[in-house]
Amino acid sequence: MKKIISIMILALLLLGRNVYAENSEATIQQKAEVSYSVKKIKAANEINETSSFYDLGVTKGENKEIQAIIANSSNQPIYVKSQIFTAFTNENGTITYNAKPKSISKSLKFKLSDFATIEASDKRIEVPPHSEKTVTAFIDVPKDVPDGVMLGAWYFEKENQVVENKEEQGIGIANKYSYSLAIKVTVNQEIEKPELKLKGVTTGLSNYRKAIQATIENESPGIISKLTVNAQILNEKNGELLYERKQEDMIMAPNSNFSYPIFLKDQEMKPGDYVLNVEASTNDPKWPSQNWSWSQKFSITKEKAQQINQDALNDNVSSENNNNLVLIGVLFLIVSGLVTLFVLIRNNQKKKRKKLKMMAKRKKREETKLKQKRLSKRQDK
């Protein structure tokens, strides 16, 4: 597995226009290993000129220029590649800036990566030892884009990094160091209110764990922060609550969706008919409190349940199965101990009987010899 350690200049947009940096600088040890850095140059007419990300206020059809500085602190020249990504929501309920999404929301008509372009000579740039280079990108805002927010990042990665391979729980991890400078483009103004929808329910694995997944979609061009989701799985026939999961303080990128997993933990996936109930709410200060609720029926086939149970890797063993395994283990040890003790006792008894027989034979031989001596003495007289 390849693990990219992104040193995020911007990671989470939590409160309206406020963006908080997650690891704006590497640790001392990381700096020694990375030997290069990337930082933003303040753009013209930013909404918040003190922000560590590109906080751009634009109008429809406007063109914007943004720049960054790449610094090389090593004794060798380096080559750095860069590209523009459109931000999306991952299944952890946070925003990803440094990769392409596996699926794109149908509501995402305008991707930042489609109209933000990097200067051709800056897509792959050489930076001499102990020097800096300035790189440039252009944002050409479409004329028919709706009001609201578009979100993405300018991603940088040095070529030919010495990859440090590690082994964690049997999984190979290759560490690389990269930078993502987040880009928030606000067209005219923020949206009046967000729109969330339940797009469907699926069953499968989430991080190799058995899960029922509710697909939640933000259909609006706005960042939804302080999001709480509570999902329940019920038996359709009797209404019994089977599984439940609640998560707070999540955040969604504009026009994106994510699969919210309800984990089965130590329980097996079972075929049958079920009902998914979901309640979602946000206390994002950009709007009054918003609430949503959805319900959807779904079924799990026997074949699907068997496949998921078979493929799951890191679920906990059920307590009942665990107790059975412990009991079997204890019984095995007891039986093994008894068998071993029986064998030892029997072998010991065999040795004793053999020893007694040998002693009896020896005594008999001695008695026979003694009788022969006495008989011989009588004959001599």
Image: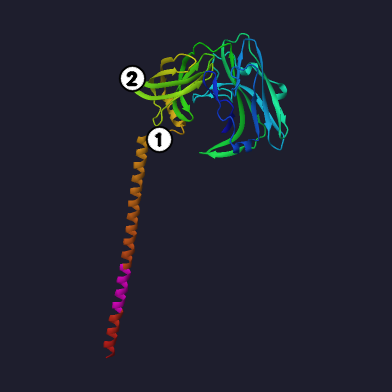
Residue farthest along the top direction in this orientation: 144
Residue farthest along the front direction in this orientation: 50
Residue 205 is left or right of residue 55, and the answer is left
Looking at the picture, how far across and down is residue 213, in whole percent? 45, 22
Asked if residue 272 lies in the magenta stretch, the reply is: no
Residue type (three-letter) at the residue carrying disc 1: Val
Q: Which span is picked out in magenta?
A: 356-368
Kindly identify the residue that appears in the image at 65 percent across and 19 percent down.
43
| Disc 1 target residue | 317
Looking at the picture, how far across and down is residue 271, in whole percent? 39, 24
Looking at the picture, how far across and down is residue 167, in whole percent? 55, 39
Placement of 72 over or under 87, stated as above or below: below
| Disc 2 target residue | 239
Placement of 26 over or under 329, stated as above or below: above
Which of the 4 image quarters holds residue 153? top right
Asked if residue 366 lies in the magenta stretch, the reply is: yes
Q: Secondary structure at mark 2?
A: loop
Q: Chief secondary structure of the magenta span?
A: helix
Residue type (three-letter) at the residue carrying disc 2: Gly
Q: CA distance from mark 2 to mark 1?
A: 26 Å
Kindly identify the residue that appears in the image at 64 percent across and 25 percent down.
40
Of the 4 image quadrants, the one containing the C terminus is: bottom left
Which of the 4 image quarters holds residue 118? top right
